Image (tube, rainbow, N blue to C red):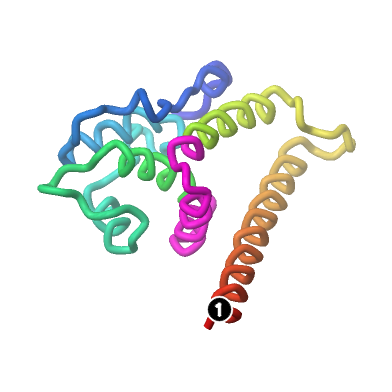
Amino acid sequence: MGLVLEDVLSFRLPRYAELPEMDLYMEQVINTVDRRLWLFSENQEGKFATASMVNNYVKSKLISAPVKKRYNREQLARLLMIFILKRIFSISEIYAFLQHLDSKNDFIFCYNSFCLLLENTMRKVFTGDCNEDTGADEVVETTIWALAAKFYAQYLLEEKRKKQKKILTNIG
């Protein structure tokens, strides 16, 4: 399938208010995720999500269980983020990331900010607006940038976990 610059530059995640208001069955969730995240698919068919993956995310408590086999707007928003984040994070890191968002007490704002920041950052990376001219090979430089960003995100999540643990220890 290969990435096309125009596709990356025009990519847009649905904002919370643009997600379906009515609850969706599993097949509808899978179709929505695949349709919205085709850019992130690793295979030629653009298939991204499976029912077993979604079920595993429920079991892992990354999203709440469906009610009467239906998923609501917030669960769908979480799934969109999870399927993107799984490209760089482990399940436990995604869990920590979502816990961090939950601590902000405004999931809708956090989700919409995530969408906007992802789109803007991808545009900057793909247009070269954030790359320093070090003389290094562009592939090597970008790979190292991505690796450093991943490690920094892991560090921030771990520091947050340590602070929460310390607070709980002091309370108890």
Q: Secondary structure at mark 1?
A: helix
- Picture quadrant of residue 107: top left
Q: Please, what is the three-letter code of the amino acid marked with disc 1?
A: Ile
Circle 1 sits on which residue?
171
Give the residue at x 58% y 69%: 164
Q: Position of residue 118 (x, y in %)?
A: 56, 33
Q: Nearer the viewer, residue 26 or 136?
A: 26
Q: Nearer the viewer, residue 90 or 105?
A: 105
Give the residue at x 47% y 64%: 92
Query: Does residue 126 lie above or below 168 as drawn?
Result: above
- Left or right, 131 with respect to 68, comes to right
Give the residue at x 64% y 54%: 153
Q: Position of residue 157 (x, y in %)?
A: 60, 60
- Picture quadrant of residue 77: top left
Residue sitting at the far bottom: 172
Q: Quadrant of the N terminus?
A: top left
Neighbour tally class for label 1: few under 14, some 14-19, many 20 plus, Cα within 10 Å: few
Residue sitting at the far front: 171
- Left or right, 67 with respect to 49, comes to left
Query: Does residue 154 lie above or below 43 as drawn?
Result: below
Q: Position of residue 172 (x, y in %)?
A: 52, 83
Give the residue at x 64% y 52%: 150
Residue sitting at the far left: 68
Q: State which region is magenta.
A: 88-111
Give yes or no for residue 33 being in the magenta stretch: no
Give yes or no for residue 99 being in the magenta stretch: yes
Give the main secondary structure, helix, strand or loop, of the magenta stretch. helix
